[in-house]
Image (cartoon, helix red, strand yellow):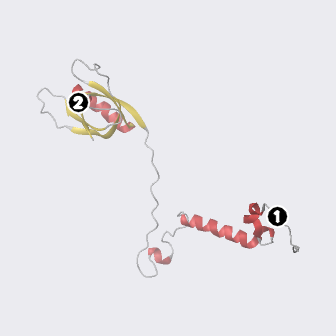
């Protein structure tokens, strides 16, 4: 003989997180949710002590308390394409798109000793290189670099007054 028992009802798993609400226990659930939200805000640094309390920056043990340092915000630098005339076309043939280069400016002077060479751009990414046969009669070649706008201005100014060279990084 089989004993009498309550029928098994399926679908209860969907209501499992809300069971406490259905039984009249709303206050503890709401209190728990508010506590979790408060801890999340405090953990993100919004509620950190700035030193105005607890002895103006001192802990109870007497050691100085420093506020929690936030990581620096991601700064996006907008890159622009800067065409640069490199004096030595043979050097440019060594470059490939995606390479990182430093651009060096040597002042134009007939004797070559009027000034020192200086680095105009560091770590510039090569965007385009000329195809073979695209060089000037004086041996220069045009390379397109991806650099920040301020560096592009410095490269343009240096290209007018100096001969430019590149070194691979």
Q: CA distance from mark 1 to mark 2?
A: 79 Å
Q: Does dot 1 land on a helix, a strand or a loop?
A: loop
Picture coordinates of residue 152, whole percent (x, y): 35, 34
The answer to whether the residue labelled 1 contacts the one labelled 2, judged by CB atoms less than 8 Å apart, is no
Frontmost residue, 5 versus 77: 5
**Residue at coordinates 27% horizontally, 32% vertically from top-left?**
158
Left or right relative to 116: residue 123 = right
Question: Is 131 drawn above or below residue 64 in the view shown?
Answer: above
Which tag, 1 or 2, sits closer to the chain's start? Answer: 1
On the image, the x and y values in percent for residue 77 come to: 43, 42
Q: Quadrant of the N terminus?
A: bottom right
Q: Find residue 117 and report its image quarter.
A: top left
Q: Is residue 3 left or right of residue 165?
A: right
Nearer to me, 35 or 59 = 35
Q: Residue furthest bottom?
A: 61
Tell me what residue is drawn at x 45 percent, y 73 percent: 57
Residue carrying label 2: 91
Which residue is rendered at x = 56% and y = 67% of the image? 42
Residue hosting label 1: 9
User: Where on the picture, by quarter, is residue 166?
Assistant: top left
Callout 2 environment at 10 Å: few (<14), some (14 to 19), or many (20+)? some
Q: Position of residue 129 (x, y in %)?
A: 32, 28
| Front residue (pair 126, 56) | 126
């Amino acid at each position: 003989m089989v004993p009498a028992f309550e029928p098994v009802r399926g679908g209860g798993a969907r209501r499992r997180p809300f069971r406490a609400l259905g039984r009249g226990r709303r206050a503890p659930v709401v209190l728990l949710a508010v506590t979790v939200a408060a801890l999340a805000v405090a953990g993100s640094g919004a509620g950190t002590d700035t030193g105005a309390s607890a002895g103006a920056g001192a802990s109870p043990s007497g050691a100085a308390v420093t506020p929690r340092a936030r990581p620096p915000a991601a700064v996006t630098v907008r890159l622009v394409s800067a065409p640069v005339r490199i004096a030595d076309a043979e050097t440019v043939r060594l470059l490939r798109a995606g390479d990182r280069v430093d651009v060096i400016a040597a002042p134009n002077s007939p004797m070559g000793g009027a000034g020192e060479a200086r680095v105009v751009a560091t770590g510039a990414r090569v965007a385009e290189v000329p195809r073979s046969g695209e060089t000037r009669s004086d041996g220069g070649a045009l390379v397109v670099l991806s650099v920040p706008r301020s560096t592009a201005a410095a490269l343009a100014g240096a290209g007018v007054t100096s001969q430019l060279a590149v070194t691979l990084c």
